[in-house]
Image (cartoon, rainbow, N blue to C red):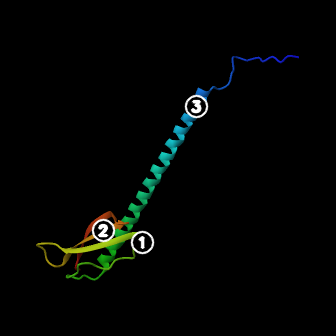
Amino acid sequence: MKKVKVWIRDERGLGLVESLAAVAVLGATVVAFVVALSTGSIAVRESDQEAVAQSLVRSQLEYIKNYPYDPAATTYPKVAELEGYDISVEISPIPDTDTNIQQVTVTISRDGEEILTVEGYKVNR
């Protein structure tokens, strides 16, 4: 008996061009997804660094404000530093004022790169 192939509605399967186009579309989608994930990851990391830096600055300024006033100070003690973060404290007198006020500059850096710098004042009360 002889086999007869019958094509229903002219179905022949996928050709090489259609297969390559489908793989290219799928590849482009995967690449776009990976790029979006890495961009999101970088943004989250930078946001976390900024939040830690803000917390360190606030803690340092509060610590300095509660520390006894020293009119000859060029710096005050620092709070405990987190691993990888550095705290820099600079005290400078304010020109043309009395000696009962100082400008405090706190700089937070990570791996040698400055993240945040905040200025405040310490008053002798």
Say how many tags the image has. 3
Residue at 23 percent across and 83 percent down: it is 70
Q: Which mark is first along the chain, 1 or 3?
A: 3
On-image quarter of the C terminus: bottom left
Residue at 13 percent across and 77 percent down: it is 98
Type of the residue with mark 1: Leu
Q: Are marks 1 and 2 in contact (CB under 8 Å)?
A: no
- Give the answer, above or below, for where 122 lies relative to 52: below
Instruction: Give me the C-alpha separation between circle 3 and circle 1.
Output: 52 Å
- Looking at the rendered structure, the secondary structure element under dot 1 is loop
The answer to whether 4 appears left or right of 87 in the picture is right
Q: Mark 3 — residue?
A: 20
- Which residue is outermost to the right? 1
Among the 4 quarters of the image, the one containing residue 19: top right
- Looking at the rendered structure, the secondary structure element under dot 2 is strand
- Across and down, in percent, residue 78 comes to 34, 77
- Which residue is outermost to the left? 96
Instruction: Give me the C-alpha separation between circle 3 and circle 2.
Output: 55 Å
- Give the answer, above or below, for where 35 lies relative to 124: above
Type of the residue with mark 3: Leu
Among the 4 quarters of the image, the one containing residue 2: top right
Pair 3/2: label in front: 3
Q: Mark 2 — residue?
A: 107
- Across and down, in percent, residue 74 comes to 23, 78
Name the residue nearer the viewer: 74 or 112: 112
- Across and down, in percent, residue 102 comes to 21, 75
Q: Which mark is first along the chain, 2 or 3?
A: 3
Q: Mark 1 — residue?
A: 82
